[in-house]
């Protein structure tokens, strides 16, 4: 479980997060939703430690992450996997080397053992025979899947996904969402997903928090989101004709 | 200015931490030997051969007085090559070739979140990316400079031979005249300091790149300009400390 308590964050005097408190449950897909510029990515980067918080605490299973030194954080980070918006695969490495990288850094496995794990992870994300390809030779969906394979290669306890299906067609986006949801259940991870895609909310939103202008406006699940009387949330969810018809 | 120097010092300190894993560091080091050293060999030898020849010809052309022996051609060529041309000018060329490459590589990794990915995995990105480059350059650049000195002197000999201005015997005699082995050590020490500057300053500008492709280009330019200035500055300081 990951908990954020009263966190605030400003950049050059502009307050981006305002006293946000939320809990992200283990074994569930926790979604952070909100419009572009609402502070979702900043919240995620604060939670994962890429940004330091101005006020408040970030707690990983009773360990106060935000109070730790950079060296102490390194140990927790070995339990963290993250899927970046653009994949963030290492350009100079092949798919196999990308997925093997965390294993090479943090385990003492032999090459054969690591390769077996790499092949298992790639198979788990429905990718085979791509080991020797470079990221530049992959499609957007494949890049995301390789990034997921790399993130799960060391069995992380916490998985962060920043806009996992941005730039993908609806079919591939749905496949990535379902894959993340399945992996979360399978490995009992605490998964936090940053998205503004309503399809993701309806598919895998077990816990949803809605942020608007840096404030936490609403918390619930996907069913409650559709029936909420929160005006800001409704404006966000039912912003297009299709979702308005769906509500009717 | 002061905050930039402070950030640079902190980054260098971070780079010199113990690597997370020795075997990964050694692999990276071997890769950097190839990418920073072997891939620069061609341009270094080409420029060295021609500049050695030009230095010899210009010296011969400027000796008008019959009182100055032609052995001076070999002597002046040797001194200018060992003291200044090979360590300093070749290092300045390597700033353009190797330094800009390092800044672009690390800068692109920064703007495409690859460095964030390393951090999230618990890897020290400064140590993982910059230390192998600094170490490799400080080992391989002196070797490149030794090759450069040898090829420059050969270039000088070929130019004298082909132009017929100086005989081989005069040229070789000049090369051996009043040779002080310490000048080679001085050249190597300068090269090691310049190699450190090239890799660490370029790595620094790459690591602190923010924005997009345009900013990667700007960082590369800043890295090349500032490293070149630092090399000239340290050239003066080291010469004052070691030769004067």
Image (cartoon, coloured by chain):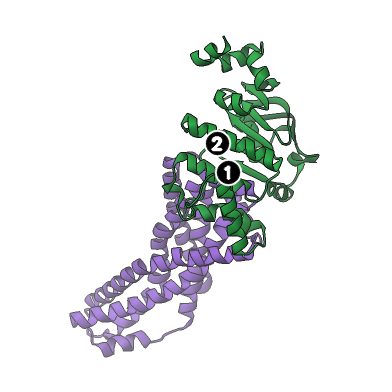
Label 2 neighbourhood size at 10 Å, few (<14), some (14-19), many (20+)?
many
Task: Report the side of B7 relative to B111 (left or right).
Answer: right
Q: Quadrant of the C terminus of chain A?
A: top right
The image shows residue B155 at horizontal and vertical percentages of 29, 77
As drawn, the label of residue A148 is 1
The hue used for chain A is green
Which residue carries the number 2 mark? Answer: A176
> What residue lies at 59% left-to-right and 52% top-to-bottom?
A120
Determine the residue located farthest toward the right in the rendered image.
Answer: A62
> What residue lies at 43% left-to-right and 54% top-to-bottom?
B100
Q: Chain of mark 2?
A: A
Task: Tell me which numbered mark, 1 or 2, is placed earlier along the sequence.
Answer: 1
Q: Chain of mark 1?
A: A
Question: Is residue A167 or residue A70 the one in the foreground?
Answer: A167
Q: Can I make out residue A149 in this image?
A: yes
Position of residue A225 relative to residue B96, above or below, is above
**Which of the 4 image quadrants contains residue A51?**
top right
């Amino acid at each position: 479980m990951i908990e954020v308590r009263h966190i605030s964050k400003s950049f050059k005097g502009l307050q981006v997060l305002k006293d946000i408190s939320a809990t992200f449950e283990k074994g569930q897909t926790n979604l952070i939703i909100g419009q572009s510029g609402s502070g979702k990515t900043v919240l995620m980067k604060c939670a994962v430690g890429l940004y330091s918080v101005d006020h408040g605490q970030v707690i990983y299973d009773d360990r106060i992450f935000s109070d730790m030194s950079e060296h102490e954080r390194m140990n927790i980070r070995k339990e963290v996997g993250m899927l970046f918006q653009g994949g963030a695969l290492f350009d100079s490495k092949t798919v196999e080397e990308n997925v093997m990288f965390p294993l090479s850094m943090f385990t003492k496995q032999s090459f054969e053992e690591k390769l077996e794990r790499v092949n298992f992870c790639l198979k788990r994300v429905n990718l085979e025979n791509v080991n020797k390809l470079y990221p530049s030779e992959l499609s957007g969906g494949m890049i995301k899947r390789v990034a997921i394979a790399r993130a799960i290669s060391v069995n992380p306890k916490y998985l962060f996904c920043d806009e996992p299906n941005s730039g993908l067609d609806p079919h591939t986006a749905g496949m990535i969402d379902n894959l993340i949801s399945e992996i979360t259940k399978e490995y009992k991870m605490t998964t936090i997903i940053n998205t503004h895609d309503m399809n993701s909310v309806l598919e895998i939103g077990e816990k949803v928090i809605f942020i608007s202008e840096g404030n936490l406006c609403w918390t619930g699940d996907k069913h409650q989101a559709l029936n909420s009387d929160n005006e800001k949330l409704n404006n966000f969810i039912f912003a297009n004709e299709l979702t308005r018809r769906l509500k009717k | 200015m002061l905050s930039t120097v402070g950030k640079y010092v902190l980054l260098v300190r971070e780079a010199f931490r113990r690597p997370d894993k020795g075997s990964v560091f050694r692999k990276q080091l071997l890769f950097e030997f190839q990418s920073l050293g072997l891939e620069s060999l061609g341009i270094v030898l080409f420029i060295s051969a021609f500049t050695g020849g030009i230095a010899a010809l210009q010296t011969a052309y400027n000796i008008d007085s019959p009182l100055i022996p032609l052995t001076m051609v070999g002597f002046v060529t040797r001194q200018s090559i060992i003291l200044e041309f090979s360590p300093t000018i070749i290092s300045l060329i390597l700033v353009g070739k190797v330094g800009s490459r390092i800044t672009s590589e690390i800068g692109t990794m920064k703007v495409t979140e690859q460095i964030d990915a390393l951090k999230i995995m618990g890897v020290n990105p400064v140590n993982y990316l910059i230390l192998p480059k600094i170490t490799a350059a400080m080992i391989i650049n002196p070797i490149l400079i030794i090759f450069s000195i040898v090829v420059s002197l050969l270039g000088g000999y070929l130019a004298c031979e082909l132009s017929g201005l100086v005989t081989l015997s005069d040229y070789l005699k000049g090369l051996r005249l009043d040779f002080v082995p310490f000048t080679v050590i001085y050249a190597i020490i300068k090269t090691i300091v310049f190699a450190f500057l090239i890799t660490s300053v370029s790595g620094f500008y790459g690591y602190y790149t923010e924005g997009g492709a345009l900013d990667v280009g700007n960082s590369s330019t800043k890295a090349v300009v500032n490293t070149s200035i630092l090399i000239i500055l340290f050239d003066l300081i080291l010469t004052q400390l070691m030769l004067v």
